[in-house]
Image: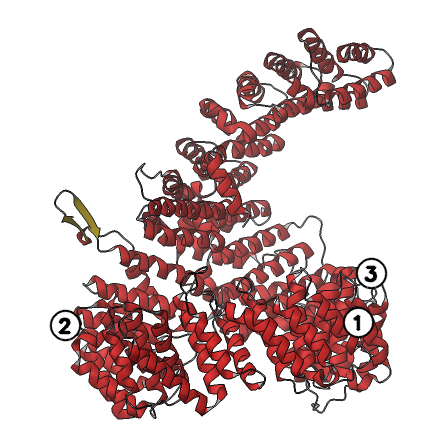
Amino acid sequence: MANLTLTGILEKMTGKDKDYRYMATSDLLNELNKEGFILDVDLEVKLSNIVIQQLDDAAGDVSGLAVKCLAPLVKKIRDQQILEMTNKLCDKLLNGKEQHRDISSIALKTIVSEVPTSSIAQSVLVSISPKLIRGITSQGMPTEIKCECLDILCDVLHKYGNLMASDHEVLLGALLPQLSSNHASVRKKAVSCVASLASSLSDDLLAKATVEVVRLLKNKAIKPEITRTNIQMIGALSRAVGYRFGPHLGDTVPILLSYCTNASENDEELREYSLQALESFLLRCPRDISSYCNNILHLTLEYLSYDPNFTDNMEEDTNDESYVVDEDDESANEYTDDEDVSWKVRRGAAKCLSALIVSRPEFLSRLYEEACPKLIDRFKEREENVKMDVFNTFIELLRQTGNVTKGQTDFDESSPRYMLKQDVSNIVRSVNKQLREKSVKTKVGAFSVLKELVIVLPDCLSDHIGSITPGIEKALCDKSSTSNLKFEALVFTRLVLASHAPSVFLPYIKAISAPIISAVGERYYKVTAEALRVCGELVRVVRPNIEGCGFDFKPYVQPIFNAIMARLTNQDQDQEVKECAISCMGLVVSTFGDQLGGDLPACLPVLVDRMGNEITRLTAVKAFAVIAGSPLHLDLSCVLENVISELTAFLRKANRALRQATLGTLNTLIVAYGDKIGSSAYEVIVVELSTLISDSDLHMTALALELCCTLMADSKSGPNVGLTVRNKVLPQALTLVRSSLLQGQALLALKNFFRALVYSANTSFDVLLDSLLSTAKSSSQSGGVAKQALFSIAQCVAVLCLAAGDKKCMSTVNMLTDILKSDSTTNSAKQHLALLCLGEIGRRKDLSTHTHIENIVIESFQSPFEEIKSAASYALGNIAVGNLPKYLPFILDKIDNQQKKQYLLLHSLKEVIVRQSVDKTEFDDSSVEKITNLLFNHCESEEEGVRNVVAECLGKIALIEPGKLVPALKERTSSAAAFTRATVVIAIKYSIVERQEKIDEILYPEISSFLMLIKDHDRHVRRAAVLALSTAAHNKPNLIKGLLPDLLPLLYDQTVIKKELIRTVDLGPFKHTVDDGLELRKAAFECVDTLLDSCLDQVNPSSFIVPYLLSGLNDHYDVKMPCHLILSKLADKCPAAVLAVLDSLVEPLQKTIGFRTKQDAVKQEVDRNEDMIKSALRTISSLNRISGGDCSHKFKNLMVEISKSQALWEKYSSIRNE
């Protein structure tokens, strides 16, 4: 049937009537696009011939449809037929009539792009390549035909370059001479063609092409236009092959630099192409370009202001910040000349500088010295597009500053942030001039610069608010302003208001508030929403606290309220606007509620109504939290009951964010308005929140328990509330306390809950204590209790005892000591818990009234079970915290006299010291002396466990007494005993904590003597130094920034496999290889990983990736894991450096994902290998996100390999979707 239809269509297609032919061709296109379309052999030939014939149809619309028919047709016919069609088309292209050339070319391109399989593509290429080459190289061939052939060949190479490896040399031989053609169009197409070919060329042929282009460039006798083409060719090659061009930079960069400098004055294009090529090198070959960066920087700065036809004598900087705009003066200095293309050079220089900023974080300080003033000066650029590029380059400089100095607070005079701070007034002055310009695009760019500046240096504009205000005002009020400009101005205003102290804005509130309030009424939703957010910040600024700050905010209350109320009551608007209006009204009510008078009862019901709407309820719940927390303590009686019942119902909803917000809002409401809420409402809330308490969502649990404590603490809650809590919440809490996941905020909330239960008198202490202690018993269903859970239970018991008063506390301690006395040989959870409870109670309360309690605890040191021993040492240390004068000498004495119990006693001492260093309590001098002498005596212990505890104790004492300890530790860095050297370095590691401490300034000048032990001859000492460096990089990067140039090469050296640390142990029937350097290598790579987060500007990734990271990727399992993490991080932060060596990184990753464990491997080995494969795939996923990664054929092939293996592809896909 289908064939009959086709026959009819084909007859009409050859008819004389043009409309018939058009309709028939259209019908054919529809038929071909049908799913089940099948052709027999005869029809296939006939159809193909007719479609080819139609291409020459005199009517253009018919031939256009015929081309469209080719795409589906190619997929439905046999290979032989496709080949015949391509041959006919090639023949038409080369020998046919001029008017049919274009359509033949389009038809050929269509066939090439639609060929269904690579095997057909292969045969098509074999057939058409020689013809296209002939079309390009034949003498006397018209230029148009050459251009068409080059165009088609470019498409072919782009898609199937890899399939034509055997022809590469011939193609190169045909294409390179075209770069010297006399016709500009041929040269231009040849450049694209060679670039498409280059990405699939071998390194040898790529070198051959480059050498040829460089030879032409060195020949000074060549016409300038040919030179320009060759420079374009260099840039195109670099963009096509990426890092593979690196080896040729030595030949090309000096030539480009000299052409740039020596070109004739009007040869702007040559300079532009040179700068574009240099930009490409900077981004794609960061390793090899390093030595030329200085020259490139000077060149870009010189050409950033290259404007030979324009003398800039009118732009004298008058420091005049007043806003005088002369409307009639059509920018008097706007020089225009259509012939002048020097702007292209300036644009090229700006982009090249931008590439330098992005790819060279280590250049930042120099860029601030040399480039920053020049860029700020060039904000006055007269060509708008170039001005945008200058703005973007400056924004990149600011962003890079933000990236590199993230987390640094105090900065010295050489740090980029400090240098930027010095330039702020120049930046503001220059940007203000741009905000006076007429062009909207310029103003948008200027606001983008200011916005990025505030993000990087949040409080830098305090002294410049007055000069910036007119610019904001003009952007928001001017008739010519577009929505985009208003939006940018508002975003900037919001950031400034949020990041500066309210007092700096007060003189300018009048000028700034009116345009913001009027922007709330804008029609475009994005502007409205942003204006509402700005209003929220404005509210905070005009009344930062209730006491007042000497500023009269009352005139602003009504205008702000009216503008927002209009938006809040309007239902027909974008969701983003609705949400912003609700949030903003919450802020207005909580800040100005006492001034709103009769408007308040009108506004609150609207907010309650928004709680009933599923789309806006979350925002409304958060708004009520803000209102309830207001220090004005507003009268909410008109809506309070409704709000409480709505919120209670929300606790049952599936939406987690809504439940969380609801718990927080209820808590705030009950604290502020508990006296107005009935106790029956409390009971309902308790029942609802009890279902939210479980270890599957600890954050929610903490919020629910906090709310429960608030309910119990309220004097209005009747006995029924306590009963409901006991029946509903207590069972959940007792289940929760057994969870090994319990920690942080949830554990704190649980302790507060037990304390509140004791205080709310209607729960008996003894019952509670029994319930808690019995949770530790192992039940038949759930088995034993986790060790972590015992610590949680012990903390809850301690809180309970202290809340119940001294008498109950005494009896509990007696009961616990009885447990220890009665039953000291068995390993029961009861004993374990008793010891932990004594420790927790002893830490909070002096137990010295219980005679010999320390001896009872120390008896447990004899237990045969490790957990009991460890619990006993924990208990002894914490009891000592409760009464240092009595128990500290006891512990010190025992450490000296009882050799066997030394390790446990040192752990007790550690508990004491750690608590003191956190609580900032001072030891008396004699204690410090005794402790440090004792610890230094144990530095050389043979047991690693003892040495580690000693190091931690020394480190924590150093926090308390840095003046004494740091010199004493430093003195021992030159000790003859390696263990002592290692111990003092680890001690320093423990003394570098995240919070500010007085040790910091004492340690700063001395830290190098500890870290330089990284070159010690003993591996234990080297590892200790690496661990200390890692901790410093994580907690206090500023301590080590100055030492990194010396430390990094030494650190990198620790990542290398050292043959002398590998030994073979003879175990009789077989030999076992032991690698003593493994732990050190692992620590070194982990340290580099930390440095990438905190000191990126110091690490030169190019010198680290090869050879160090590369060797790590081929190393042991424990080393590969951190190396995968490092590579992922580098792919994200320094993609250019990774791209430069991507080929060499593929092989180790390929090995890792292809590794199979032996048949008889144990489960642990199989699991480890699975983790390793996932880790490698995660890294590959990061590498795949780098733009330009497709230049690496090896990486492309790796991705193909992964996609072919079902198991690997499934893992890869799940990782990508994480």
Between the residue at mark 1 and the residue at mark 3, the CA separation in whole angstroms equals 16 Å
Name the amino acid, label 2: Ala
Report the quarter where the N terminus lies: top right
Which SS class for mark 1? Answer: helix
* Residue highlighted by disc 3: 573
Structure colour scheme: secondary structure
Read off the residue under disc 2: 976
Mark 1 / mark 3, whichever is N-terminal: 3
Q: Mark 2 and mark 1: span between their CA atoms?
A: 75 Å
> Where does residue 1100 sit, x and y in percent of width and height?
39, 57
* Residue 785 percent location from the top left of the image: 41, 65
Q: Nearer the viewer, residue 1203 or 778?
A: 778
Q: 1192 or 130: which is nearer to us?
A: 1192
Q: Is residue 864 left or right of residue 25?
A: left
Residue 748 position in % (x across, y down): 51, 76
**Sequence-first disc among 2 and 3:** 3
Q: Which is in the foreground here, disc 2 or disc 1?
A: 1
Which label sits in the foreground, 1 or 3?
Answer: 1
375 or 1149: which is nearer to us?
Answer: 1149
What residue is drawn where x is 57% and y is 34%? 192
